Amino acid sequence: MAPQIAPSILSADFARLAEDVERVADSADWVHVDVMDNHFVPNLTLGLPVVQALLKHSPLPLDCHLMIEDPDRWAPEYAEAGAKSVTIHAEAAKAPIRTLRAIRAAGARAGLGVNPATPVDGFADLLGEIDMLLLMTVEPGFGGQRFLDVVLPKVRRARELIKGRDLPVWLQVDGGVSAETIERCAEAGADVFVAGSAVYGADDPAEAVRRLRGQAEDATAKAGW
């Protein structure tokens, strides 16, 4: 699959979300929405009402990343609202298979998120239940953090697991993705890249997305994924 770029509005202007989404509409593939509840992670961002409002104005599909304590309760509602991808965290879900199936039944792609210290091998049997595996490359909770190189071997291992089962599962990385790190992520096997500060901290967010995509495409071609 060709690399995809999902700018994170965690780094956008919350007072101008619709405008900031429009700024990358012609260059990005997704809008990444970080939902945080100040319980699963030590930060509070936005929730379902804001997603519902944004859906009315976004020209791009929404990729909702739920960093919340009770994803089993809330995740299907994001899919029912119209989000095209909804990711729950393995560390938070009590009934992951049921919840992932409910997300799919509501018409969205189902994602499973994994924190930096959580091994991926234990979730190999769940790969058939998901459309995307999200590997955090920072500790979840805040934007603008430094990329954790220690996660790169896990990215490569996840790609091997997906490839070994011949499944159409996307592999997303989230956290510290920038011009300095995206090539390493692509070489390790990632194909969906969440970038917040690297996009919305740039003078021209759309051009920043295009540059990141070019780097990811070049690195993916060299790696042969």
Image (tube, rainbow, N blue to C red):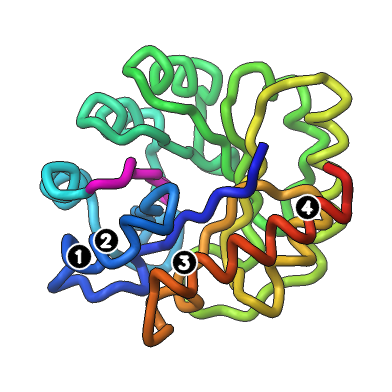
Residue 61 is covered by the magenta coloring:
yes
Three-letter amino acid code of the residue under disc 1: Leu
User: Element at badge 4?
Assistant: helix
3 and 2 marks in contact (CB < 8 Å): no
Q: Looking at this view, is 20 or 162 the one in front? A: 20
Query: Which residue is identified by label 4?
Result: 220
Percent position of residue 28, x then y: 43, 55
The Cα atoms of the two marked residues, 1 and 2, are separated by 6 Å
Residue for point 73% across, 21% down? 167
- The residue at the far bottom in this view is 203
Amino acid type at circle 2 is: Val
Q: Are marks 2 and 4 in contact (CB under 8 Å)?
A: no
Residue 21 tag number: 2
- Nearer to us: label 1 or label 2: 2
What kind of residue is marked 3? Answer: Gly
Q: Which residues are magenta?
A: 59-67
Q: From the image, state whether disc 1 or disc 4 is nearer to you.
A: 4
Q: Residues within 10 Å of mark 4 (few under 14, many from 20)?
A: many
